[in-house]
């Protein structure tokens, strides 16, 4: 079972529907730590403010079990705000503690570009990752965001895109995967990415 963590940020049902359209049926949206504890894979999507997301995740009781399961090796996929939350800290209207699962910071896109960044951008693969298996390089995915994760280690960046500056569109650190774009809104390529994550989960289970 893949658990989509409900921490009251964004339309999580669209991510669930994305998995279903990708042929992955055993997916639940939940704010119950017990569901996360027994899940084979964990997804943290979301749209909104870093501060509120961090607070909601802690108040729900899901943060500690999420950290524990990821540390144990459970496959994890962060989407959009869920990727940004992996940072040690986020800088949106102050400084806020993140999950610290991918060392680095989350800060605003650079001046000189239209904010938020909304639209289709191609993604390049500096490092091969099973998340992009059978998805050609320079495929376009759909982005909606004003902030981005800046990892301390560039070697965790498995997808990058250009919008005023080249930034991390996808990261992988051991069993932690994350994308800044919305695969559930990215047509067939996005659905293939969700299927790839489900395959990663299945592989870890066996």
Image (spheres, helix red, strand yellow):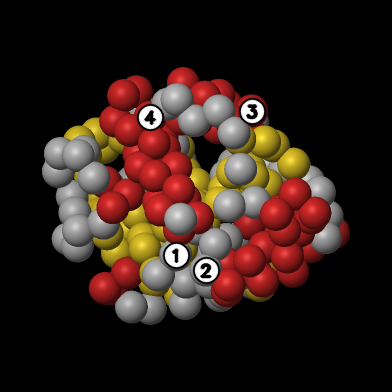
Q: Are marks 1 and 2 in contact (CB under 8 Å)?
A: yes
- 9 up-or-down from 174: above or below: above
At horizontal 26% and vertical 46% (from top left) the residue drawn is: 132
Q: Which residue is mark 1?
A: 175
Q: Position of residue 9 (x, y in %)?
A: 68, 42
Q: Earlier in the sequence, mark 1 or mark 3?
A: 3
- 151 up-or-down from 129: above or below: below
* Dot 3 alpha-carbon crowd within 10 angstroms: few under 14, some 14 to 19, many 20 or more: few
- 50 up-or-down from 21: above or below: below
Left or right relative to 171: residue 122:
left
* Dot 4 alpha-carbon crowd within 10 angstroms: few under 14, some 14 to 19, many 20 or more: many
Q: Earlier in the sequence, mark 3 or mark 2?
A: 3
Q: Earlier in the sequence, mark 4 or mark 2?
A: 2
Which of 23/154 is in front? 23
Q: Which residue is mark 2?
A: 73
Q: Label 3: state its secondary structure.
A: helix
Instruction: Kindly report the distance in space between the C-alpha atoms of the residues bearing marks 4 and 2.
Output: 24 Å
At horizontal 40% and vertical 70% (from top left) the residue drawn is: 174
Q: Label 1: state its secondary structure.
A: loop
Q: Which residue is mark 4?
A: 191
């Amino acid at each position: 079972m893949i658990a989509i963590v409900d921490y009251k940020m964004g339309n999580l049902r669209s991510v669930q529907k994305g998995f279903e359209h990708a042929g992955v049926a055993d997916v639940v949206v939940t704010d119950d730590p017990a569901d996360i504890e027994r899940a084979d894979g964990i997804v943290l999507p979301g749209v909104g403010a870093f501060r509120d997301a961090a607070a909601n995740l802690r108040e729900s009781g899901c943060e500690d079990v999420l950290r524990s399961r990821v540390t144990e090796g459970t496959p994890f996929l962060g989407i959009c705000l869920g990727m940004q939350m992996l940072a040690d800290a986020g800088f949106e209207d102050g400084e806020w503690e993140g999950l610290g699962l991918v060392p680095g910071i989350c800060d605003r896109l650079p001046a000189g570009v239209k904010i938020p960044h909304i639209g289709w951008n191609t993604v390049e693969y500096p490092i091969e990752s099973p998340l992009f298996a059978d998805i050609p390089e320079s495929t376009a995915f759909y982005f909606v965001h004003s902030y981005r994760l800046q990892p301390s280690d560039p070697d965790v960046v498995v997808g990058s895109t250009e919008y005023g500056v080249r930034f991390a569109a996808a990261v992988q650190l051991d069993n932690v995967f994350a994308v800044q774009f919305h695969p559930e809104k990215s047509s067939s390529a996005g659905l293939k990415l969700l299927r790839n994550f489900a395959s990663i989960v299945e592989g870890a289970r066996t």
